[in-house]
Amino acid sequence: MSPQEINNLIARYLDGQTTPAEERQLALEVQREDAPPEWRIVAEMLGELTRDEALYDRIMAERASRPATRRMNRWYWSVAASVALVIGFSYYTYIRTPQDMAQSREAHTIKQNTLRMTIKPPSAGLQISRVEVKPPPPRTTPTPLPQDTILQQAPTTDPVPEQNVCPALTELLLAEITERTLAAESYEEQLYQDLLNEILLNTNELANQPELIL
Amino acid sequence: MTPQDFEQIAPEMRQLMLGVGRDFFGNEMDAEDVAQEGLIALWRYCQRIEAGHPVRPLAIRIAKHCCIDLVRRQRATLDIDEQPERGFAPPGTRVHPSPQEEMEAHELQQALDDAVGRLNPSEQRLFRLRQIEGLTLDEISEQTHIAKPSVKSMITAARRKIFEAMKEHVHKD
């Protein structure tokens, strides 16, 4: 408040036109260090009760405005956290799960077929006399191929010459693809069960044919 | 107001002052100090008024004053007078006056008492109701059964008289 405004307020105060709120404001304004004598007289007339009430009200008003800001910030944060939770829950429930299931089924199918290929069905007429366990070959660190070699070995989409096609291999690949497609349509529990059944079946056959050499 | 009259209203006024102190300080110990000092100040004032006079607004004003006064004393105890009055007083406000300023303030207070003492009883009463009890013109009119325009003109006259008397006292010094 400028000195002119304070003088105007003092004039209104002496004319009895000020409200109690204006008088509290005036009590604070006339407390300045460089106050002229007239201001100090008005300060004394208003009294310390008016001045301290004005101070008290100002302090409480400032305090009341600070928590409001904190509450607003907390409100924004809680809304943001809720939105993030909803998005995360929706993603894991409605978006991720079908893809994840499909990927999981495919992975189990590949694993099952790999095991099927590893455990060869016994040939008819073979007799298992003994089982030999061969030690694994020593581990060797593969040397990285030069970049040109990798490019030369990159797969191509060119048609394979007819003389290079092996009918037996084609038949085997088609069977494999069919088998994988069928297996991908079933649930993973069923696939696990099939895998276990097959392992048990092969194991039983191996046990019944002791002459088979793996 | 007799001591017996004051004893009847004291518990209610104490709770009122405790509430003001709790709101301000947020602890029971300071709130108790506010209520204790406030009741003493209220009793001093009530000795001069008649029984049945509403003192609730005055009790709140006194409690607020006691809160600010307690802060001043706590600051003085902590010896942080050289620190600026951050957060409590507006810029430029002197909360801790120098001895010279205290003496001038005391003289001004004496001049004010003298000036109020020279007013006629009606003006004195209305001036106190407005300046000490903080009542509005409507509340004063309701309490004194004097028309509001008359209340306003009497308060204006009282203020003018006091202001001129104090100005004369200041310029004389």
Image: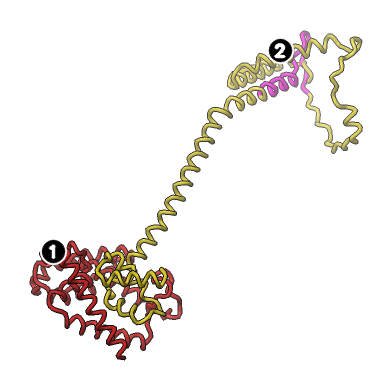
Count up the numbered dots: 2
Label ID, residue A62: none
CA separation in Å, label 2 and label 1: 106 Å
Q: Colour of chain A?
A: yellow
**What amino acid is at disc 1?**
Ala
Q: Is A152 situated above or below B99?
A: above
Give me the chain that's red: B
Expressed as whole percent of the image width and height from the top left, the position of residue B10 reads 15, 68
Q: Is A213 left or right of B6, judged from the image as shown?
A: right
Residue tagged by mark 2? A178
User: Is disc 2 in the same subunit as disc 1?
Assistant: no
Q: Is B98 situated above or below B150?
A: below
Q: Is B48 situated above or below A66?
A: below
Residue tagged by mark 1? B147
Q: Is residue B107 magenta?
A: no
Magenta stretch: give its range. Answer: A108-131
Q: Is residue B30 visible?
A: no
The chain letter under disc 2 is: A
Q: In which image quadrant can residue B81 be found?
A: bottom left
The chain letter under disc 1 is: B
